[in-house]
Image (cartoon, rainbow, N blue to C red):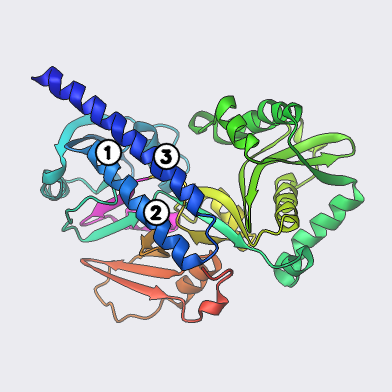
Amino acid sequence: MKNFYQSFKVKVNAWMDRVILFCSKKMVQFNLIRQPRLRRIVISFFRWIGSLALFVKQFPRLEAYTCQHALGKFIFLGVEKIECVLFLRQIDHELNDVDLEPVGRVYLWALPKQVDRWLTEGVDAVVCDLSRTYPLAFNTNYQIKTPIIIEQVIYLPDSAEAFLSGSKFRELRRRIYQAQRSNITYRFSQEKSDFDNFHYHMYLPYIQKRHGDFADINDYEAQWKEFQKGGLVMVCKDDQTIAGSLVQSAEDFAIGLEGGVLDVDPDLLPKNVYSLMFWACIEWALAKGAKRFDLGTTYASRNNGIFRFKKSFTARVESQPRFIFPNRMILMNHPSAGLVSALNETGWIYEKNGKHFGVILDESQDLAHDGYAKDLDRAVGDGLDGIVVLKPKQKKFIEAPDKSSLQGIK
């Protein structure tokens, strides 16, 4: 009987994988809809279907792990081992590795009670990756619901000059003028030789050096398929290609997928070469007539370097429209002051009804307290819709009062 169940579960999961892949493809397809409200509705529908398939895959039990960290004891449920380490690295940048011990499997319908039990037994935080369609509620004091990854999107004006105007891009303008004087140019390519050069001599070494053991690398075949749908923006100094980015476009939409920098002595490259590559992609998108330029996915936390870099180009935070991901729940009852501080420093992003809010953990009970003006200003500057203040058993959403102040209204 056990063998029959395991065989049946494998077949069901394979069916659900096909459903998830179908929904992901439809989300990519309908992301080209120009009308923002209709685009969100259609993508949300296929995201819901895909999330339902993910729930079937997760049913009936999820694997749990525990670990002890300086900030407290953690339980991870439904989270891949590598993702457990990456989560802890987001709140502790000095962490290199951690010992994870298996706890066993937990039935989904028993999860809320099991979480309560863990938190009363000395666990400081339970981190769960659950399908968006998971139907049960939790009863913990603090609940951070983050989408794991988000998209950062620039809404483009009609010209490069209009984009660069104002004091915000004074430094970028200086870099561009300096690059032009140094004979740095860019070109668009669909040549296989350029793709091979990019993949082996730019992308692979750049990602491996930047992320080390935690690098999430796309293989040659996967990147080749994406390349065939668009091409490469290649940044050149004199006659040598020094950086590149995979790009695609359709109608008024363009996207930059993955980039890399030539694997040579950094002293031989111009300073801020990655910024110059980003600008080359923006110029290419403008030349294609794009009004939305998608900078790609980023972890849903504001204190990581990739998010900050993309934010510097006035990117707006949006729901990612390409993959079916679970929600990540961070559940706590009595977190230590150190853990609260670390979570606030990480700058988690909370998603609600397609809007995105910066998380502020506040242990006080006074929801009438209104001293969050600086937090709200920072959230708007980071491309968010506002902030959510989480207090014991309470949450308060504060949206930006002047929506016209947001770069690129959705």
Q: Is residue 44 placed above or below 210 in the rendered structure?
A: below
The residue that disc 2 covers is 342
Of the residues under marks 2 and 3, which one precedes in the sequence?
Answer: 3
Tag 2–tag 3 contact (CB < 8 Å) = no
Tell me if residue 343 comes above or below residue 352 in the rendering.
Answer: above
Q: CA distance from mark 2 to mark 3?
A: 14 Å
Q: CA distance from mark 1 to mark 2?
A: 23 Å
Helix, strand or loop for disc 1:
loop
| Residue at 54% across, 53% down | 307
Residues rendered magenta in the picture: 325-349
Q: Is residue 342 magenta?
A: yes
Which tag, 1 or 3, sits closer to the chain's start?
1
User: What amino acid does circle 3 point to?
Assistant: Leu
- Judge by depth and name the residue closer to the eye, 5 or 268: 5
Q: Amino acid at mark 2?
A: Ala
Within the magenta stretch, is there residue 300? Answer: no
Q: Which residue is mark 3?
A: 86
Residue 210 in percent (x, y) is at: 59, 36
Name the residue nearer the viewer: 124 or 325. Answer: 325
Q: Is residue 100 visible?
A: no
- How many numbered marks, from 0 up? 3
* Residue 408 left/right relative to 79: right
Residue 167, image quadrant: bottom right
Depth order, front residue of 279/74? 279
